[in-house]
Structures are given as C-alpha cells and as structure tokens.
Image: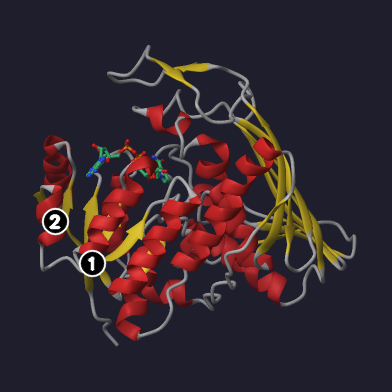
C-alpha cells in the first residue's frame, strides 16, 4: 500500500538541517517541501541544494502546503518557534530539547493539546536498528529484571567541530540537556520511566575557545551551564543507574550505556546514532555480539564518514509522526516522552543546586516497539551524501 504522504517544512537551516533534508527521501510517507531561516541566505542555499522551496519563517508557517513544522533552531528558540507553529495550526516536531526549562516544555504540550495538533520531539535514534534490537532483547527477557546499568560519556565538547557552538554552553545546552537526552530516552525506551534523580554538577572551564573552522574561530564563549555532572537515576521498575556526563575531558571520546539485569548484562550501542551491535552476556557467559537489521548499517555518518555504529537517520521520528497521523495511531517520539525526558534532564540541575533528590512527576509510557516496521518505510532510494 502506498502511504499518504504528509508535507513538512524545516525551520532552521543550520548544521543539522543537512541530515534532515538529505535523509527525508530515504523513507516513504513524508516529503519536505520548504525550508526557512531568519538568515535568508542559509534558507536559500539549503533550498537550492535539496530542491525545496526556500522561504521566510512567517511565510513557512502560513504555507497551507506544510502539514508538519520541523523545528531545527537552537534550543533557546524552541519554545517560541514551536508555539508559533502550533498557533499556525501545524503539527510540530522539535529537535531536542523540547524546551530549555520544564515550563517551556509544558507550555508546548498544553498548546498542542488545545490546538488539536501532534507534538513530536527528537531524539529519534532509539528508532534505529541498534536500539530496536536492544529493545527486542530486553522484551524477550534477555537480561531478566533490570537492576542497574551505566550512563557514561566523557568528551572534549563541541567547540572544536561545531561552526557556531555558543548555544551548547548557554541555558538549554550542557552535556545533560544536549547529549544526556539520547541516553535517558534510550533507557526509557528499554526499561520505562524514571522515578527520581540526584546529582552533583560543576564546570571545569569558565570559558571555551572556539577552534572549529569558520567565522567564530578564536571566539571565547562564557560557560553558563555545568559541563561535568555526576548523578543517578532511579527508574519506576526499580533499577538504579549511575550517570557521568562531561565535556571537560580533552583526550577522551568514550561512552558507555549498559544495563545489568537478574539474568544478563547488555552493552548497548551509542544512543546518539541509529546503528551498532549490542553485546549480550546471558547469565555471566562470554559476551555475544548481536547485530541489528541491515538498515542501521546502510549509510555513513556525515560528520565522521564512518559507517555502521554511527549511521545517521535523523528524520525517522518525523517519518513515524507523519505515518502515525495518516494511520490514526500514536507516534513514538511523542510530546509525553519528550516532556518526561526534559523533566529528568532538568532535575539533574535542580538536584545539584538544591542538594537533594528530585522526584519526576510527568507520566510516560514506553513507546511501541518497531517490529521490523522501519524497513517497511524504506523508500529504496539512496540518500544523497550530506
Ligand atoms: N548539529 C548537530 O549535530 C545536531 C545533532 C542533533 C541535534 N541537534 C539539535 O538541532 C538543533 C539545531 O542545531 P544546529 O547544530 O543545526 O544549530 P545551528 O546553530 O547550526 O543552526 C540553527 C539555525 O537556526 C536559525 N534560527 C535561529 N533562530 C531562528 C528562528 N527564530 N527562526 C528561524 N530560524 C532560526 C539560525 O539562523 C541557524 O541557521 C539544536 O536543538 C540541536 O540540539 C544538532
């Protein structure tokens, strides 16, 4: 059956827009028809490159051809840009985080509900073959009852590769809101919602020097958020998972996402990407490497050029949203999930400042698993190299 195709407009034509614009044609059910940016030159360049209509933000919101607005602006603009899209009667899919505070996220969720439009939000990486395979293993009981795990990422940060990295160090940035979103969403997909959070936070550097190529090179950025956070999450299922998240480590680029259960141990793929194998030990036996579907391996990552573990399909959440609207079912990267994750992420900062546990109140259920459906959405067309 040929699916109904919904049409989307991209708001924000910066660094990540290449991935969305190039990957959209890889899947059926969604077509990007327009893009806009407050920088008209950027919108025009992306429009020409990807064969879509380049326009101004207001015109994109007023465009009757646009069903879904994909908000790819920096975090601090998510709430205002998202609210304008909802007010224009569009379904909204936002890059993460949903807002830079829980209040911003709640306001978007309330506005979307009142307007009768869908609210979706990144990350969508848990829809990739890597994490869907892990989900299948957990659901089959491969680790038994989840007891604990580990979230660990320690890197140098963003100012050595992103051309305009100021937002990473402002409110709404920092390793927890920016990268932690992938890890927490991945674990909620696997073992369900979080019950409470505790943390200590600090910052290793008062300012950061931009060393990426481009006009911002040499700029010094003030650091307004913690760049080293150590804490723990207690999940509703009873599992307690420690977390270390930092951008203050020059020579490290390591990550760990692990689950320890009553029957087994799982070492999970990088939740920032769509592919990667899971390493599974059943009852203490040697680790076996379990491979995901072919889809997760099909394209290399645009930044690193590496394939496999870093396959990048940032658009899959919007494709699921479009298909969910057409099919009249819930979408997986939902406002409820994003709001729950945002509350968890904001709770790290609150716990660190107030010196106490923070209880999580927003309800959320695990999104439905994708029983091979991702491959069914594949258009068969190769995405052009971004
Ligand atoms: N860069 C990445 O690799 C990456 C990966 C995953 C997610 N994200 C997320 O995507 C979002 C965008 O990141 P980016 O790296 O592309 O940022 P960026 O700064 O490169 O691009 C943002 C663009 O939005 C435009 N913009 C700002 N305010 C606007 C407004 N009110 N209306 C229309 N356009 C506006 C800017 O002119 C700029 O072109 C962020 O939320 C980030 O967390 C980025």
In 3D space, how far apart are the residues under numbered discs 1 and 2 (Cα atoms)? 10 Å
Left or right: 156 in relation to 67: right
Left or right: 368 in relation to 267: left
Which residue lies under the disc numbered 2?
A: 60
Q: How crowded is mark 2: few (under 14 residues within 10 Å), some or many (20 or more)?
A: many
Marks 1,2: beta carbons within 8 A: no
- Outermost residue toward the front in this view: 354
Residue 21: image location, x then y, percent = 26, 53
Q: In which quarter of the image is the N terminus?
A: bottom left
Label 1 sits on a secondary structure element that is loop
Q: Residue at x 61, y 21 (%)?
A: 250
Q: Which residue is drawn at 43% across and 45% down?
A: 301
Quarter of the image holding residue 264?
bottom right
Residue 262: image location, x then y, percent = 87, 67
Residue nearest the viewer, comparing 257 with 352 = 352
Q: Residue at x 37, y 41 (%)?
A: 76
Q: In which quarter of the image is the C terminus?
A: top left
Which residue lies under the disc numbered 1?
A: 90
Residue 360: image location, x then y, percent = 64, 59
Query: In the image, ligand 1 is in what quadrant?
Result: top left
């Amino acid at each position: 059956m040929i699916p109904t195709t919904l049409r989307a407009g991209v708001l924000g034509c910066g660094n990540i827009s290449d991935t969305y614009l190039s990957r959209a044609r890889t899947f059926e059910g969604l077509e990007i028809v327009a893009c806009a940016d407050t920088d008209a030159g950027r919108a025009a360049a992306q429009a020409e490159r990807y064969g879509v209509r380049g326009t101004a933000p207001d015109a994109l919101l007023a465009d009757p051809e646009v069903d879904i607005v994909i908000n790819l602006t920096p975090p601090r603009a998510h709430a205002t840009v998202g609210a304008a899209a909802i007010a224009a009667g569009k379904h909204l899919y936002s890059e993460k985080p949903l807002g830079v505070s829980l209040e911003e996220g709640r306001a978007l969720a309330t506005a979307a509900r009142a307007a009768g439009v869908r609210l979706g939000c990144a990350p969508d990486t848990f829809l990739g073959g890597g994490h869907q395979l892990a989900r299948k293993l957990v659901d089959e009981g491969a680790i038994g009852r989840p007891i604990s795990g580990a979230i660990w990422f320690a890197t140098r940060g963003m100012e050595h590769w992103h051309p305009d990295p100021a937002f990473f160090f402002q409110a709404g940035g920092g390793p927890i809101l920016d990268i932690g979103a992938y890890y927490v969403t991945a674990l909620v997909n696997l073992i369900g919602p979080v019950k409470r959070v505790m943390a200590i936070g600090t910052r290793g550097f008062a300012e950061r020097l931009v060393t990426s190529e481009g006009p911002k090179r040499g700029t010094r950025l003030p650091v307004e958020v913690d760049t080293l956070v150590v804490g723990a999450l207690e999940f509703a299922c009873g599992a307690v998972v420690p977390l270390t998240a930092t951008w203050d480590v020059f020579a490290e680029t390591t990550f760990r996402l692990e689950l320890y259960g009553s029957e087994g141990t799982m070492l999970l793929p990088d939740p920032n990407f769509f592919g990667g194998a899971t390493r599974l030990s059943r009852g203490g036996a040697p680790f076996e490497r379990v491979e995901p579907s072919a889809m997760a391996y099909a394209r290399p990552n645009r930044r690193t050029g590496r394939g496999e573990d870093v396959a990048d399909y940032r658009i899959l959440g919007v494709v699921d949203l479009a298909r969910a609207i057409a099919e009249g079912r819930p979408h997986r990267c939902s406002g409820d999930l994003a709001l729950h994750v945002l509350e968890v992420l904001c709770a790290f900062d609150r716990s660190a400042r107030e010196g106490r546990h923070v209880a999580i109140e927003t309800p959320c259920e695990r999104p439905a698993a994708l029983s091979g459906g991702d491959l069914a959405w594949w258009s068969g067309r190769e995405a052009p190299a971004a």
